[in-house]
Amino acid sequence: MDTSLKAVIDLGTNTFHLLIGRVGSDRKIEEVYRKRIYVRLAEEGIGVIADAPYKRGLAALEKFRTVLSTMGTIPVVALGTAALRTAKNGQQFIDEVKANFDIEIQLIDGMTEANLIYEGVRNGVELGTEYSLIMDIGGGSVEFIIGNKSGKFWSRSYPCGVAVLYRKFHKTDPITPGAIQEMNEWLDELCKDLLVAIHEQQPKSLAGASGSFEVLAASESEELLSPTEVSTEFFVKRYDELKYLPLIEIEQIPWIPNERKKLIVVSFALIDWIISKLRTEKIVISPYALKEGIFFTNLL
């Protein structure tokens, strides 16, 4: 048995992830196994996990349990985020997973989520002495962290993930300019303290983690294996290409994964909103996020 191996299960609103690996001497994660399954827990709203996504979630964890059973006895941390902490039947799901698969899910709050994301990004990219704004876009929530290589100085979690934004604002196909404007005004109100922190701390760059930023990176290269830097000009070009396309045309764009095509417009609109506040010229896309951050904490 390899005692250095550890396993992390990240149960997000849109995707469930299993990552098995170890931290090498270079402080990089040596992966043994990685699997992402799109479960879309908030497909019919985040207040209750509907029957179909509930079953998809259980099926995903059954697959993860099968993989873990081949690894012997290794430490496993399973963390539940926005959907499981919000849904009325989230605890029921957690109890059923424990009973059926002997996987104990820990619910974490938004601040803990932000701390883990910071640890992941700090070990995934070269943060400098200047402040960066770290942004992790999930299905149910979005985490913002202001920090540099020395530490995290400010963080918040907001209930404005892409599944939430889609249900609230993307009510026509394609979305309308008025809906995007309404979304921007709603974000201005929801994230008032973020805008104050940006004004006070003056972060010089945007460091993006997780799904929507991975899609942006994939529009340049096929796989995100190391930090990717793109200009905000490049992002705006990509966003303008798809902003008002109907879904049937978005489905023909090869660099957007099929599972993300439906939500890509609101996710890019969210990135565009924060860029307008930050006024940065570059986006650094981290290969590490929450699940990788766990490897660098005492949770494992």
Image (cartoon, rainbow, N blue to C red):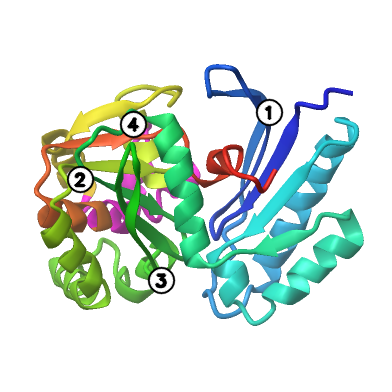
Q: Secondary structure under badge 1?
A: strand
Residue 296, which numbered label?
Answer: none
Give x and y (percent) for residue 293. 53, 42
Give x and y (percent) for residue 234. 16, 33
Q: Which residue is mark 1?
A: 21
The vertical placement of 79 against 189, above or below, is: above
Mark 4 → mark 1, Cα distance in angstroms: 23 Å
Amino acid tagged 2 = Tyr
Give x and y (percent) for residue 105. 73, 60
Q: Nearer the viewer, mark 3 or mark 4?
A: 3
Mark 2 → mark 3, Cα distance in angstroms: 23 Å
Give x and y (percent) for residue 202. 13, 52
Range covered by the magenta-colored residues? 243-269
Contact check, label 2 and label 3, Cβ < 8 Å: no
Quarter-of-image position of residue 233: top left
Q: Which residue is mark 2?
A: 239
| Residue 247 is a magenta residue | yes
Q: Secondary structure under badge 4?
A: helix
Inspect this view and state whether residue 257 appears.
Answer: no
Q: Secondary structure under badge 3?
A: loop
Q: Which residue is mark 4?
A: 217
